[in-house]
Image (tube, rainbow, N blue to C red):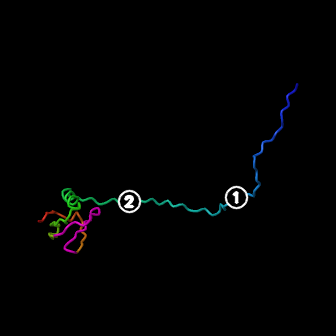
Amino acid sequence: MKKRMWNVEIHPLLFIASPSYIQEKKIDEIEEESTSIYVRPIPEKIENSLVARQLNYFAKPVKEPRMLLFILQSGERIHASIDKINGSQVLLNCFQTKRWIHANEIVMIHHTV
């Protein structure tokens, strides 16, 4: 007895003929890619480590602002409280006016009572 193999083609259970929607893109127009790299600026360091520690300590929030005496390299004396520190720039609150100074210009900071 010979065994017969059935010659059966396998088709998907549901086949829907649809048109192809492939659109060809023109190769002539090549888009340029951006090769720019963002480099963060390196913040300027405060040279005097004592002044840097004092600024960080006195910039912490308290109930009432601390009145400080800032002595600058030019000899100028400023009575103010620290409002904000941005890198090596310090925003001082000097009796209702605000003033930016560079931290490396500060020679000494004294706490006034």
Residue drawn at 70 percent across, 58 percent down: 22
Q: Residue at x 36, y 60 (%)?
A: 41
Where residue 59 sits, quadrant-wise, is bottom left
Q: Nearer the viewer, mark 1 or mark 2?
A: 1
In this rendering, the answer to whether 13 lies above or below 112 is above
Q: Is residue 2 visible?
A: yes
Q: Residue furthest right?
A: 1
Query: For residue 82: magenta?
Result: yes
Front in this rendered view, residue 74 or 43? 43
Tell me which amino acid carries mark 2.
Arg
Q: In the rendered structure, which disc, 1 or 2, sits on the residue that comes first in sequence? A: 1
Task: Specify the amino acid type for callout 1.
Answer: Ile
- Closer to us: 59 or 101: 59
Circle 1 crowding by C-alpha within 10 Å: few under 14, some 14–19, many from 20: few
Whether residue 70 is visible: no
Q: Main secondary structure of the magenta part?
A: strand
Whether residue 57 sits left or right of residue 38 in the image: it is left
Image side of residue 2 versus residue 109, left or right:
right
Q: Which residue is mark 1?
A: 22
Check disc 2: other Cα within 10 Å, few if <14, some if 14-19, many if 20+: few
Q: Splitting the image into 4 quarters, where does residue 112 fall?
A: bottom left
Percent across and percent down for residue 70 are 16, 66
Q: Position of residue 4 (x, y in %)?
A: 85, 31
Is 101 colored magenta in this rendering? no
Question: What span is in magenta?
Answer: 79-96
- Label 1: state its secondary structure: loop
Q: Label 2: which residue?
A: 40
